[in-house]
Image: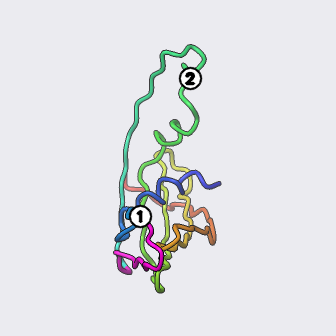
Amino acid sequence: MRRGIPLIFAIVGLATANSFLPLVSGATYMPGVGVGNFMKFGGSESYSSDDPTLQAKPQFLKDIDNTAFLRADVESISGTTVTYKETESFNNGTADKVMILVEDVNTGEETQLAAVFIMSLSRAG
C-alpha cells in the first residue's frame, strides 16, 4: 500500500534543493539534504461537503485522523539519489509502517524498496 508516498514525495521535494525549479536540459540537480537529516510532522484535517452523496468522510481522511506522525529520515545519498526511511506511526496502537524509499532528485522518480510493519513494544502516552 503506497498511501503515504505522495505526501512524503512532496516533503522530500521540499527538502531537496532545486526540486521545484523547471528542469533545464543538461542541468544536474543535487540533493539539498544530508545523511541524518529528517522531517517529522503530524497534522489534522477537517471535512465537510454540501454534496449529499459525499457526506461521509472518505477513508483516506479517516486514515489521516488515525496517524500520530509521519517521519522521513535520510539514510544515504549517492549522486542525485536519496534513500530515506519513512515511518508512519498511528494513534490506535497499530504497528508502525516503515518503508524504504529511493528518489532521484533529477528525475523525480521514486522507488519503494521495502515495506515492513514494526510492532511497538511500548508507547509513551
Quarter holding residue 1: bottom right
Residue at mark 2: 56
**What is the secondary structure assignment of the residue under circle 1?**
loop
Image coordinates for residue 43, horizontal then vertical, percent: 37, 45
Quarter holding residue 77: bottom left
Image coordinates for residue 85, horizontal then vertical, percent: 49, 70
CA–CA distance in space, label 2 to label 1: 39 Å
Residue at mark 1: 22
> Which residue shows up at 34% across the image and 71% down it?
17
For the record, the magenta segment spans 22-35
* CB under 8 Å between discs 2 and 1: no
> Which residue shows up at 35% across the image and 75% down it?
33
Q: Is residue 67 above or below residue 18?
A: above
Image coordinates for residue 106, horizontal then vertical, percent: 48, 74
Q: Does 115 sit left or right of 47 as displayed?
A: right
Depth check, front residue: 52 or 124: 52
- Is 33 included in the stretch rendered in magenta? yes
Report how many numbered discs are placed on residues in the image: 2
